[in-house]
Image: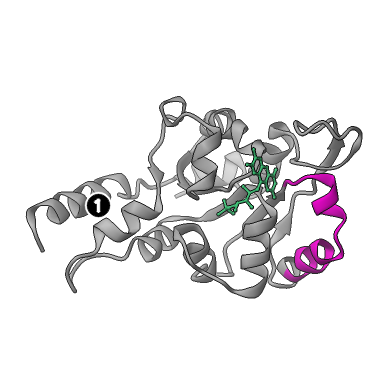
Amino acid sequence: ANMQSDDLVSSLKTDLSKSCGTVRVLVGVTGSVAALKLPVLVSELLQLSGVDVRVITTEHAKHFYNPSDVSVKIYTDKDEWELWTDRSDPVLHIELRRWADLLIIAPLDANTLGKIASGICDNLLTCVVRAWDTSRPLLFCPAMNTAMWMHPITAQQVSRLKEFGYVEIPCISKKLVCGDEGSKGAMAEVSTIVSAVRQYLPKPDESQKT
Ligand SMILES: Cc1cc2nc3c(=O)[nH]c(=O)nc-3n(C[C@H](O)[C@H](O)[C@H](O)COP(=O)(O)O)c2cc1C
């Protein structure tokens, strides 16, 4: 491996070093306007005690937030490919699935929903999903325009994901950024998402044992 990739490998090892008593939450973010909420979602998750957070972004999701507003490492498709130059190098999507105790995809857009439902894995996020250890929780928060939501393929794909054992955090009705009013498709509120994650954390008394 060359110098640059050695540096990348050692910084990955530092970033993904596991501290005990911590629940490691991986947040996947896709190209929906609801990705605007990434900074607040991450900061609210970090306020849960004993939670560590990393983010995986799709390329289109990057359009909606400013990475400097997010206080944890954000992994991109570029990281996946730059990290690997030599047989001994780690594969990022495998390292991330190993690191994480829980994956939450918020928002999950129509495109990535369709990809996950059919097993497509053409970027870092969908590779982590495809390689996911299904004994660990995977939560998803759909977010799309009402017309997209109403298309019959949406319900089919959402139920497919539920068959895989993934947990839906249902979308809600509200005035969407695109102007369509009062109809379904908006991402669940951040507070709802954080409460859903909290269900999977050890109860305070349990975490004091060991
Ligand atoms: C301004 C804008 C807002 C968008 N909002 C959504 C959305 O809320 N939900 C959705 O499913 N797609 C939305 N899209 C379309 C997705 O970004 C597009 O399907 C993209 O290919 C998704 O790529 P990704 O799944 O790899 O992130 C939006 C596109 C634009 C340009």
Q: Quadrant of the N terminus?
A: bottom left
User: Which of the two residues, 23 or 37, is positioned nearer the viewer here?
Assistant: 37
Left or right of 15 in this view: 126: right
Local SS, label 1: helix
Query: Residue at left 78%, top 45%?
Result: 145
> Could you classify mark 1 by the number of other residues whose Cα lies within 10 Å: few (under 14), some (14-19), or many (20 or more)?
few
CB at disc 1 and ligand 1 closer than 8 Å: no
Q: Which residue sits furthest top?
A: 69
User: Which of the two residues, 84 or 54, is positioned nearer the viewer here?
Assistant: 84
User: Which of the two residues, 71 or 154, is positioned nearer the viewer here?
Assistant: 154
154 magenta-colored: yes
- Total numbered labels: 1
**Could you tell me what secondary structure mostly forms the magenta stretch?**
helix
Q: Which residue is mark 1?
A: 13
Left or right of 72 in this view: 1: left
Magenta segment boundaries in residue numbering: 143-160
82 magenta-colored: no
Q: Which residue sits furthest right?
A: 182
Query: Residue at left 19%, top 74%?
Result: 87
- Residue 178 rendering spot, x and y as whole percentages: 77, 34
**Colour scheme shown:** one colour
- Residue 168 rendering spot, x and y as whole percentages: 75, 55
User: Which of the two residues, 200 or 185, is positioned nearer the viewer here?
Assistant: 185
Query: Residue at left 53%, top 46%?
Result: 60
- Residue 32 rendering spot, x and y as whole percentages: 64, 43
Left or right of 191 in this view: 40: left
Query: Residue at left 32%, top 52%?
Result: 79
Q: Amino acid at mark 1?
A: Lys
| Vertical placement of residue 116 versus 15, above or below | below
- Residue 92 rendering spot, x and y as whole percentages: 34, 60
